[in-house]
Image (cartoon, rainbow, N blue to C red):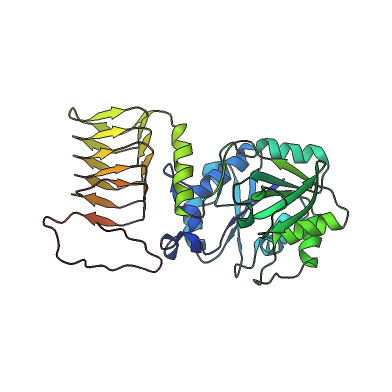
Amino acid sequence: MKGLVLSGGKGSRLRPFTYTGAKQLVPVANKPVLFYAIEHLVAAGVRDLGVIVGDTGEQVRAAVGDGSRFGARVTYIEQPAPLGIAHAVLVAEQFLDGEPFVLFLGDNFLREGVREYVQGFLDSGANAQVQLCPVPNPSAFGVADVRDGRLLRVVEKPADPPSDLAVIGIYLFDAHVLEAVKSVRPSARGELEITDTIQWLIDHGLRVDHRVVRGPWIDTGRMDDILQANRLLLEDLQQRNEGTVDGGSRLVGTVVLERGARVERSVIHGPAIIGEETVVRDAYIGPFTSVYHHCRIERAELAASVVLEHTELVGLPHRIEDSLIGRFVRVEGEQSRPRVYRLVLGDHSRVAVP
């Protein structure tokens, strides 16, 4: 069985971060979301992976490499334009070579992994298997209509959902899916929809099974989703210290210090993770916080947040909470209260001021 991991797309819901970086490389608990997808596939015995890339392909290639660090073999497949999930299957036809495969959207997070779903599909003899998850807002997703234990149809973002079961971004298919993809027409938004593809399989008498996933699933396409996934992973954190902590500091609860991290005259309440070569000085870091590598948190307080690499938070008069802060950012407190605000803000920015 092969794996097909989607790591293209523009990530418009995570702007402004995705103007300069791939959405699948935003870190959760100091590891890019994409890496969890790859690790889950390898743990399920799926090691021959095709990674679909687009505009941010060079970043993805640099991060993932040839896959050997994960115990996988990676082939990169260019999708010339983001024309839908089913279109990604079409451009991967040569790589798939008629074998069954797992289709995994690289920004999906499933804490329990996919091993049981992969094995269940291989044992079942089904032509396809879709994974479902109950959600409070099904009209925002593709939704499954399941009756008497059978999947009858899937509907893309229906105004009147037939159930609360969202079709999540993890699918299993055999070679029949290529015939389906070649038969469906682009939707109103100009994309080949995976829901239309699945419906074609159902309508043509092919066996499409479904499984309701165990454990949390998150589509990490928005800031709040990243923070939620970060919280879930930090709950399972195992204590590790590869850095240094001076005598004037306290680590409370489960705290991970990655290689070269330094904590000086500071308090860190876990669960929290501090990245490589990051300095925490005269600061407080509260629970459910991830600070990535080569950052500096000095004379500042931070809690329930994700901070990306090479960022500095210095001399802040108020605590930062429930925030996602990008790469190479510097947030510095003023010594005196300004009479005016001077701002340079990118598109889709949100700023709250006192």
Report x, y in % for residue 164.
67, 47
User: What residue is shown at x 59% (from left), y 40% (from top)?
Assistant: 40
User: What residue is shown at x 39% (from left), y 38% (from top)?
Assistant: 288
> Residue 68's quadrant in the figure?
top right
| Residue 266 in sight | yes
314 left or right of 165 in image: left
Q: Is residue 136 above or below residue 120?
A: below
| Residue 3 in sight | no
319 or 195: nearer the viewer? 319
267 or 43: nearer the viewer? 267
Which image quadrant: the C terminus? bottom left
Task: Give the number of marks.
Answer: 0
Report x, y in % for residue 156.
69, 59
Which image quadrant: the N terminus? top right
Report x, y in % for residue 27.
44, 48
Which residue of the protein is positioned furthest toward the left in this rendering? 336
Which residue of the protein is positioned furthest toward the front in this rendering? 160
154 or 292: nearer the viewer? 154
> Residue 83's quadrant in the figure?
bottom right
44 left or right of 321 in image: right
Report x, y in % for residue 217.
58, 43
341 or 264: nearer the viewer? 341
User: What residue is shown at x 70% (from left), y 39% (from top)?
Assistant: 117
66 left or right of 119 in image: left
Q: Is residue 70 above or below residue 312?
A: above
